[in-house]
């Protein structure tokens, strides 16, 4: 990896999800001291080599004057039909390569003060975003993320054609969970060589009929109320479905009959009893905000072991809309300061 080919690094290391950016960085892998890395590599080679023999010979107990000889030999043999009997080693025929470029989903879950443990890089003459310097034993590595992976989606949003800093900001504000759809370096090159549509490749992975969750703001009507009821699913604890009245505030806000209720007013619905959920709705005041998803899409998320997060949602009927401003820097700057603060909900905002 040549430093002159790198436009920028954005790191999600050590200081949590706050990015650090470097230009024309000399690079280099950090995290494991060289001596320790060599020991780990030698140990792995010893354990996984099919012809390895592990032996322990002649252990002497000098304190008793007795000498006990013990020899333990374990052989790992290879049979072309049965495979290798070493459970620490798995060899595949790389069937995925035969099927063409195959995206890989990595779900990263970190603690409140932990880092994800990788850098996001924008390389010269490349449109996409590549993962570099994945820390050994980090959240990123445990999720299956590897050095050289190319991003297709961040939290179900296609990002290949999105500005690099915007992608980094999306990762920064994701909270403690992050879902990345990636292609390995080999599969990415193969996709480009074959002229594959990366957007279509990502869409097929999620399921063509799969739609993301919806974040719906429902105002209370003085006469019609909220216009929905919640029904617990029999035999499935913490699972609730939405029932809407035709033409009601809930339906106008984007909620459909039969939607699965995932979050309500910032609380995970599956963590609430039906009694607690009913009390929350009664005390919600003049509005309630719900995160819902249709059942077909929920099955797609379940099949892919993908959590349903507010960060993935499209918004419906929200009372406040973002405003885009074009600002020109004056002699004394832009005239304001930006700082990061922790809100009452526990999330970080700027």
Image (cartoon, helix red, strand yellow):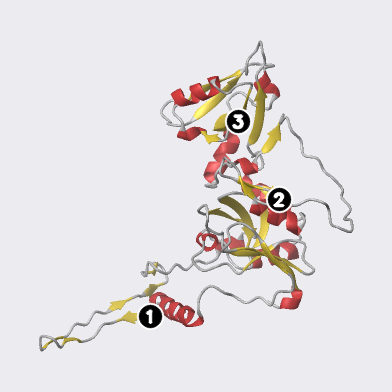
Indicate left or right for 154 with 141 as reference. right
What crowding class fits label 3: few (fewer than 14 Cα within 10 Å), some (14-19), or many (20 or more)? many
Q: Nearer the viewer, residue 350 or 112?
A: 350
Q: Are marks 1 and 2 in contact (CB under 8 Å)?
A: no
In the image, is residue 114 above or below residue 241?
below
In the picture, the disc for residue 51 is 1
In the image, is residue 268 above or below residue 89?
above
Residue name at image x 74 percent, y 65 percent: 193
Provide residue 142's location: percent of width, then percent of height: 50, 61
Label tally: 3
Provide residue 72's location: percent of width, then percent of height: 24, 79
**Quadrant position of residue 222:** top right
**In this view, the mark in front (3 or 1):** 3
In primary-sequence order, the first of circles 1 and 2 is 1
In the image, is residue 27 above or below residue 103?
below
Residue assigned mark 3: 290
In the image, is residue 34 above or below residue 312?
below
Residue name at image x 71 percent, y 78 percent: 2
Residue assigned mark 2: 158
Q: Give me the C-alpha separation between circle 3 and circle 2.
A: 24 Å
What crowding class fits label 2: few (fewer than 14 Cα within 10 Å), some (14-19), or many (20 or more)? some
**In this view, the mark in front (1 or 2):** 2
Provide residue 23's location: percent of width, then percent of height: 74, 70
Residue name at image x 57 percent, y 62 percent: 145
Q: Give me the C-alpha separation between circle 3 and circle 1.
A: 58 Å
Q: Give me the C-alpha separation between circle 1 and circle 2.
A: 45 Å
**Quadrant position of residue 214:** top right
Is residue 242 among the parts visible in the rendering?
yes
């Amino acid at each position: 990896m040549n430093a002159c080919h790198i436009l920028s690094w954005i790191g999600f290391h050590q200081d949590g999800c706050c990015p650090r950016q470097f230009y024309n960085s000399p690079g280099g892998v950090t995290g494991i001291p060289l001596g320790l890395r060599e020991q780990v590599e030698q140990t792995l080679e010893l354990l996984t080599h099919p012809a390895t023999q592990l032996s322990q010979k002649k252990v002497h107990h000098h304190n008793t004057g007795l000498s006990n000889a013990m020899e333990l030999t374990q052989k790992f043999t290879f049979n072309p039909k049965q495979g290798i009997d070493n459970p620490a080693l798995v060899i595949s025929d790389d069937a995925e390569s035969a099927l063409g470029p195959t995206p890989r989903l990595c779900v990263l879950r970190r603690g409140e003060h932990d880092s994800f443990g990788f850098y996001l890089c924008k390389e010269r003459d490349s449109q996409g975003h590549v993962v570099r310097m994945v820390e050994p034993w980090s959240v990123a590595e445990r999720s299956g993320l590897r050095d050289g992976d190319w991003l297709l989606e961040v939290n179900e949003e296609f990002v290949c054609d999105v500005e690099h800093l915007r992608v980094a900001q999306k990762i920064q504000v994701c909270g403690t969970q992050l879902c990345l759809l990636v292609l390995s370096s080999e599969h990415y090159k193969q996709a480009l060589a074959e002229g594959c549509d990366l957007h279509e490749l990502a869409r097929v992975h999620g399921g063509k009929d799969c739609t993301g969750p919806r974040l719906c703001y429902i105002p209370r009507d003085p006469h019609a109320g909220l216009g929905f009821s919640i029904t617990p699913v029999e035999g499935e604890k913490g699972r609730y479905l939405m029932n809407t009245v035709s033409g009601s505030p809930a339906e106008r806000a984007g909620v459909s009959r039969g939607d699965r209720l995932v979050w309500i007013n910032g609380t995970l619905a599956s963590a609430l009893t039906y009694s607690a959920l009913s009390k929350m709705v009664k005390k919600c005041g003049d509005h309630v905000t719900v995160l819902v998803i249709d059942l077909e899409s929920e099955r797609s998320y379940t099949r892919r072991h993908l959590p349903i997060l507010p960060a993935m949602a499209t918004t419906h009927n929200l009372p406040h809309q973002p405003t885009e401003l074009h600002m020109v820097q004056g002699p004394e700057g832009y005239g304001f300061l930006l700082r990061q603060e922790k809100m009452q909900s526990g999330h970080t905002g700027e």
